[in-house]
């Protein structure tokens, strides 16, 4: 797939970011903006993410696995129920995920823009 086609596929997506580390959240916001996405959040707590999810349209999400000491699975469950694609961005890697989430795209922190783009597209396939 050509770069312009990739950019068109992601352009305008409203992406929920759940990340409790401020610098990582800022970097992720910049990356998503570079891909043409609108960032929802970031949410630094699970309850904040659920409030954002319930309050507005979300097309996709990037979830840190451990958010301020709480696992992000309630947000993943809500996204799954709504049919919203999402990826995990975590330092734990795929081995840190429980079933049924092991088949979800996982970005190992730190990651590059190209890896984020690929994971986002894989989540929507």
Image (cartoon, grey):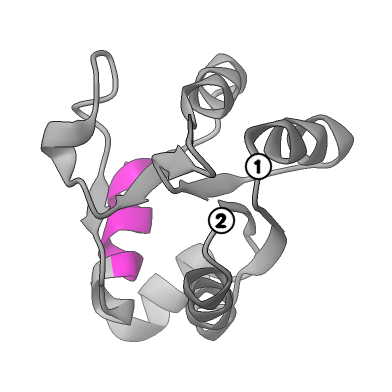
Q: Are marks 1 and 2 in contact (CB under 8 Å)?
A: yes
Q: CA distance from mark 1 to mark 2?
A: 7 Å
Quadrant of the image for the C terminus? top left
Q: Disc 1 or 2, which lies upstream in sequence? A: 2
Numbered circle sitting on residue 45: 1
Kindly report the secondary structure that dominates the magenta region of the rendered protein.
helix
Count of residue discs:
2
Q: Is residue 84 left or right of residue 125?
A: right
Dot 1: within a 10 Å radius of its alpha carbon, few (fewer than 14), some, or many (20 or more) residues? some
Instruction: Give the image location of residue 99, x and y in percent.
Output: 23, 14
Quadrant of the image for the N terminus? bottom left
Under circle 2, the secondary element is loop
Instruction: Give the image location of residue 90, x and y in percent.
Output: 30, 51
Residue at position x 54%, y 55% in the image = 19
Numbered circle sitting on residue 84: none
Under circle 1, the secondary element is loop
Residue at position x 28%, y 49% in the image = 122
Of all residues shown, which one is farthest toward the left? 95
Residue that mark 2 sits on: 20
Q: Is residue 98 left or right of residue 27?
A: left
Q: Is residue 41 left or right of residue 16?
A: right
In this rendering, is residue 2 above or below 70? below
Residue at position x 49%, y 31% in the image = 72
Residue 88 picture quarter? top left
Instruction: Give the image location of residue 47, x and y in percent.
Output: 72, 31
Residue 74 is inside the magenta segment: no
Instruction: Give the image location of residue 40, x and y in percent.
Output: 72, 57
Residue 2 picture quarter? bottom left
Query: Which residue is more in the foreground, 112 or 74?
Result: 74
In this rendering, is residue 103 above or below 61? above
Task: Give the magenta-colored segment's residue range.
Answer: 116-125
């Amino acid at each position: 797939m050509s770069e312009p086609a990739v950019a068109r596929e992601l352009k305008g997506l409203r992406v929920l970011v759940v990340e409790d580390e401020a610098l990582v959240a800022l970097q992720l916001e910049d990356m998503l903006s570079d891909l043409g996405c609108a960032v929802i959040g970031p949410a630094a707590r699970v309850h904040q993410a659920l409030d954002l999810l319930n309050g507005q349209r979300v097309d996709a999400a990037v979830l840190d696995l451990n958010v301020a000491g709480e696992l992000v699975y309630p947000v993943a469950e809500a996204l799954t129920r709504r049919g919203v694609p999402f990826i995990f961005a975590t330092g734990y890697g795929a081995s840190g995920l429980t079933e049924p989430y092991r088949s979800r795209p996982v970005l190992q922190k730190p990651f590059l823009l190209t890896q984020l783009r690929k994971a986002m597209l894989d989540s929507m396939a």
